[in-house]
Image (spheres, rainbow, N blue to C red):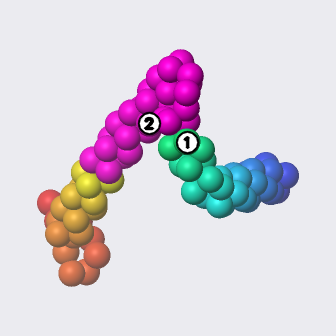
Amino acid sequence: THFRAELTRLRAEAADFAYAELQGILPQAVAALADALGHADPQVRLRAVRVALSMALKAAELREFQQRLDQLENALALWKSPSGTLRR
């Protein structure tokens, strides 16, 4: 229905806006995390270390996933014939 399509479009627009806002504050968040790594309270430092390590591992996983996706897309492109149809 038209309503459902419009709702889906608006949700995607809101998600895009939220993502852009988060990208904008990312430098501040990284600086705050770096500050927390030097905090006097060892519990604060430990939490900051855990967050930093978790984020680093997630970034490595995403990088590997993107590389694998790129390889699959390249393989699919090679598998397609010049006319754009798949070879069998």
Is residue 27 depicted above or below 39 in this figure?
below
**Residue at the bottom extreme, as displayed:** 82
Assign a secondary structure to mark 2.
Answer: helix
Q: Can you give x and y, in whole percent of width and height, for residue 82 in the image?
A: 21, 81
Q: Can you give x and y, in whole percent of width and height, for residue 28 in the image?
A: 62, 53
Query: Which residue is label 2 attached to?
Result: 52
Mark 1 neighbour density, 10 Å: few (under 14) some (14–19) many (20 or more) = few
Q: Amino acid at mark 1?
A: Asp
Looking at the rendering, the stretch of residues picked out in magenta corresponds to 36-65
Quadrant occupied by the C terminus:
bottom left
Closest to the observer: 28 or 72? 28
Query: Which residue is label 1 attached to?
Result: 35
Between discs 1 and 2, the one toward the N terminus: 1
Closest to the observer: 12 or 37? 37
Classify residue 73 as left or right of residue 28: left
**Residue at the right extreme, as displayed:** 3
